[in-house]
Amino acid sequence: MGTTPSPVPTQNGFPVATLQAFDAAYFAAQPIAVQCALGITPGKGQFTMNALGQNAAGMGTAEKLASQGYFIDVPIMVWGWDALMTMTQRIMDGVKEYPDLLDVSTRVPSTNVVDYPAVPVPAPPAGDLVGVQIGQSNSYYPTALAVTLNLPAGYQWNQGGNTYVAYYVIQQVMTQSQQILRWSLVS
């Protein structure tokens, strides 16, 4: 008697591992500035969601990035739709090109992971990136050097025998939101 293979976990008919691998590749292929501003964790394809299930960075952040020339795929990057499912649906619907947020440029939908090469994270120059501690918390302000580097969330840095992880907080001022770099002490 043979053994019955374990069922592969799926979501809407897609193997979960395939969804996760494609989403990670899709987001890793975005420019570092886009990853940071949208709060995307490099290599994970995840960002903070709001109560509506959308990217917490919001449309204002996406519009700002688009006005700077970045390609913003609204359903995936703002509304939080899954990248592989969205690309698959576009292809099934016969979509040959899809527009960015400002309808300025287009891209061809693809479900091939090799079409999404990871953007390399630049190595930071020598110097301190972690500044002073924020109160009694395990959070730290960045140095001026760290702010200029556009480091992605999740970036790890060793300084003074400690390991820190970069993260971004969203500060909402009126109708504008901005991402602010902070460091969290890991060890």
Image: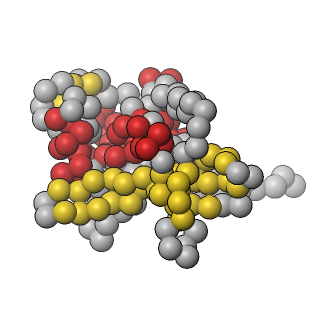
* Residue 145 located left or right of residue 97: right
The residue shown at (67%, 47%) is 158
Q: Is residue 37 left or right of residue 139?
A: left
Q: How is the image coloured?
A: secondary structure
Q: Residue at x 66, y 61 (%)?
A: 186
Q: Position of residue 109 (x, y in %)?
A: 32, 28
Q: Nearer the viewer, residue 143 or 52?
A: 143
Q: Residue 115, how many percent across, how many down?
A: 44, 23
State the residue in front, 39 or 159: 159
- Residue 10 in view of the camera: no
Q: Pinpoint residue 165: horizontal percent, then vertical percent.
A: 58, 53
Residue 123 drawn above or below residue 150: above
Q: In the figure, is residue 123 to the left or right of 64?
A: right
Q: What residue occupies the far bottom of the structure in this picture?
A: 136
* 185 over 135 or under it: above or below: above
Q: Compare residues 157 and 19 and report the one nearer the observer.
A: 157
Depth check: give the residue in front, 16 or 156: 156
Residue positioned 37% across, 37% down in the render = 33
